[in-house]
Image: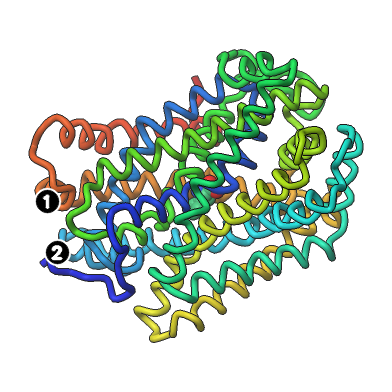
Amino acid sequence: MAERRESIHGQWSGRWAFILAATGSAVGLGNIWKFPYITGENGGGAFVLVYLLCIAIIGIPIMIAEVMLGRRGRRSPINTMRHLAREEQASQLWQYLGWAGVVAGFLILSYYAVIAGWAVAYIFRTASGSFTGATADGVASIFSDLVSDPERLLAWHTIFMVCTMVVVARGVRSGLEKAVRYLMPALFVLLLVLVGYAMNTDAFVAGAAFLLTPDFHALFYQSNAQGVAELTAEPLLIALGHAFFTLSLGMGAIMVYGSYLPRQASIVKTSVVIALMDTLVALLAGLAIFPIVFANGLEPGSGPGLIFQTLPIAFGHMPGGAFFGSLFFILLAFAALSSAISLIEPAVAWLVENHGFTRIYATVWIGLLSWLLGVGSIFSFNIWSGEEYQLFGKTFFDLLDYLTANIMLPLGGLLIAIFAAWQMRRSSCRDELGLTDGLVFKGWYFLIRYVSPVAVTIVFLNAIGLLTF
Ligand code: PHE
């Protein structure tokens, strides 16, 4: 019986612990590093609008479905899918959805740890006062010095990966839960401080307008390699992919956290809270960053280095900047850590369940392999950055990011929606969500059954060129 199933890995101490952990997974580099730079690359407000729509009508319903599957299965995503498929008399092939998630998480972690390493490096840079009074050019050259040095990147990448392994190895309660309890609220407060700084720059209105005023021309017409504006639907896929990435959906992270969720907690309410907090953090990060971009004549579309080239300018000029700056990067590194741990938790839980690995042993294996793959992403910023090392005009890092965030996660999410809405009995869903057959349930069921699958399919086919309007 589903009701009495317990996870062998333990349980969260309560609903709030789950909210904190899942928010810890959701809020990370995706919100503070990636959201601003892809918004900058895709023309601003219209991109934000599409992203918000994706969160509301696709992300939240799929998050509810993912937590629901996890709590019903009470195992690692691979075993959860296998058991639920059996219970619901669906094909055993569904377990491969769990597998795909494990692979996606492992691939994401490999480059995630590299970028998180930049954040760790910046803790020390900021604390040492390197940015005090620095100009935009000075800040940019400090950044390019860092990323062009593979040895330094490797050192920071290694440090971050080891921290991730230590936390995961300690297990659900003592490791994961404690780490996020104080860090998330602190990060939030610091972002508010940064927005406060941005408000005092002359370009606050310009920055806020860039983020919040939709300009669909800027979204759909983007310069190609020759600098000619071309009509493209790809930004829609990037917005969709980011909705999955930022909410940690489509690869089992939220599913495995759901499997540690106590039975009484309301899945719908918790999912909405998590998605709202995640979105708020991303918008605050945008509000802090774009005014600085415009006040200093920087390029919003300058790519993955955006926050590392903008925020240090603010820290270099505000009173107590070295202190606030290093605190900010400490918190960013912790936000990244609380996301990173959820990226390998599905794989670790599976190795423990099926192969009798101890948690520590499982973590070390997955961490090591992912660390090794990360070296490819490190080289993407220096010795492999040239065109001869690119495929489809993308570096190894770009390719991994594109493949995981824009393809694997939306496909994983699509299959989660299909399983929940078309393979599971309606009564099983209602039972697990603890809902009556009222408006909330009907609304969710409609979104997950029709809206999310159709929307993901259309955006997907369109972006890969199989469907044109
Ligand atoms: N949501 C995390 C972030 O925004 C990244 C992540 C993706 C974590 C997928 C787990 C699973 O940084």
Q: Quadrant of residue 227?
A: top right
Quadrant for the N terminus, please. Answer: bottom left
Q: Is mark 1 within 8 Å of ligand 1?
A: no
Give me the C-alpha separation between circle 2 and circle 1. Answer: 10 Å
The quadrant holding residue 284 is top right
What residue does disc 1 label?
A: 431
Look at the numbered discs 2 and 1 and tell me whether their residues touch, using CB distance below 8 Å. yes
Q: Position of residue 77 (x, y in %)?
A: 35, 63
Q: State left or right for residue 316 relative to residue 259.
A: right
Visible in this render: residue 89?
Answer: yes
Whole-percent x, y for residue 465 in the image:
55, 32
Taking the spot 81% from the left edge, 33% from the top edge, the residue there is 317
Amino acid type at image mark 2: Ala
Amino acid type, mark 1 = Asp
- What's the residue at 61%, 27% (across, down)? 287
Mark 2 or 1 closer to N-term?
2
Helix, strand or loop at disc 2? helix
Image coords of residue 298 (percent x, y)? 81, 26
Q: Nearer the viewer, residue 330 or 408?
A: 330
Residue 309 screen position, x and y as percent: 79, 38
Is 74 situated above or below 368? above
